[in-house]
Image (tube, rainbow, N blue to C red):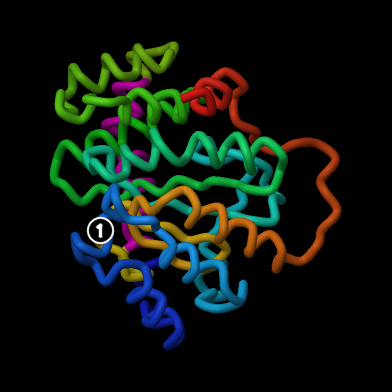
Amino acid sequence: MSKSKPIMIVTGVAAAAMLAGVVSYTATKPSSPGASGSSSVAEVSADPSAGVYAELEAYARRDASDELALGRADAPVVLIEYADFKCGYCGKFARDTEPALVKKYVENGTLRIEWRNFPIFGEESEAAARASWAAGRQGRFWEFHEAAYAEGAKEKGFGKERLTALATEAGVPDLARFARDGDSAAAREAVRKDQEQGYELGASSTPSFLINGRPIAGAQPLETFTEAIEAAAKAAPQKAPQKAPQKAAPKETASKKADR
């Protein structure tokens, strides 16, 4: 959506923004280690249509050529993640939860994951976001994502040399092109577009998610996501699958992440 379009689409979007985290640190704080997480699961496992907004469901791009997405473009469920590479809770989700979702739902065609760069922690966040996009231009976004969210990676910062090292680790073949792409106007525009979309739905903390139009805030327990995905899949219109898979996860990366 462009800035020229009204931000207040319908009153439901404002309500969804509140559900998406009320833009505070505590809203994105995951449950404490000792918590069962049952309240989160109960919230998303009720009526599958409760808390779902058609306007937010339409944020899914379903672009088969999108390098910042995993899974079939026609998957019945789309999880959109708004995240920052300097966000510790985003890293927790990437390491502890996402691999299980990829293995259980992406690989069988139920789920598509669409990434949105949502840098909110300053210049290094912006630089990492552009670098991830640049890695995607060479088909290595998810490998870069894995390297950038590895345990202890963010503590090393995301300066220019560090980003090049992460690109090398991710197997980006042309590092000169990677550097040019990461500093390009196209990269800045792509990140701006993702960030603007996040702000429009009311998120200003990370990670924030939409699952077929249902907002979820923070690196919640795995069960919160599985319940939401299964409820969304059950409620989704049944469609005949496409003849060929669309933008499936690279086998190496998917299996590597699933084994974590």
The structure residue drawn at horizontal position 13% and vertical position 45%, both measured from the top left corner, is 122
Tell me if 157 is positioned left or right of 216 in this view.
left
Which secondary structure, mark 1?
Answer: loop
The x and y percentages for residue 242 are 82, 45
Closer-to-camera residue (233/122): 233
The x and y percentages for residue 230 are 64, 57
Question: Which residues, given as a range, are shown in magenta?
Answer: 178-198
Q: Is residue 161 above or below residue 201?
A: above
Quarter of the N terminus within the rendering: bottom left
Q: Is residue 50 above or below residue 56?
A: below
Mark 1: few, some, or many residues within 10 Å (few <14, many ≥20)? Answer: many
Tell me the residue that label 1 is attached to: 205
Which residue is at the far bottom? Answer: 11
Tell me if 5 is positioned left or right of 72 in this view.
left
* In magenta segment, residue 193: yes
The structure residue drawn at horizontal position 53% and vertical position 28%, both measured from the top left corner, is 258
Q: Is residue 209 above or below residue 251?
A: below
Dominant secondary structure (helix, strand or loop) of the stretch shown in magenta: helix
Question: Mark 1: which amino acid?
Answer: Ser
The quadrant in which residue 16 appears is bottom left
The x and y percentages for residue 86 are 22, 39
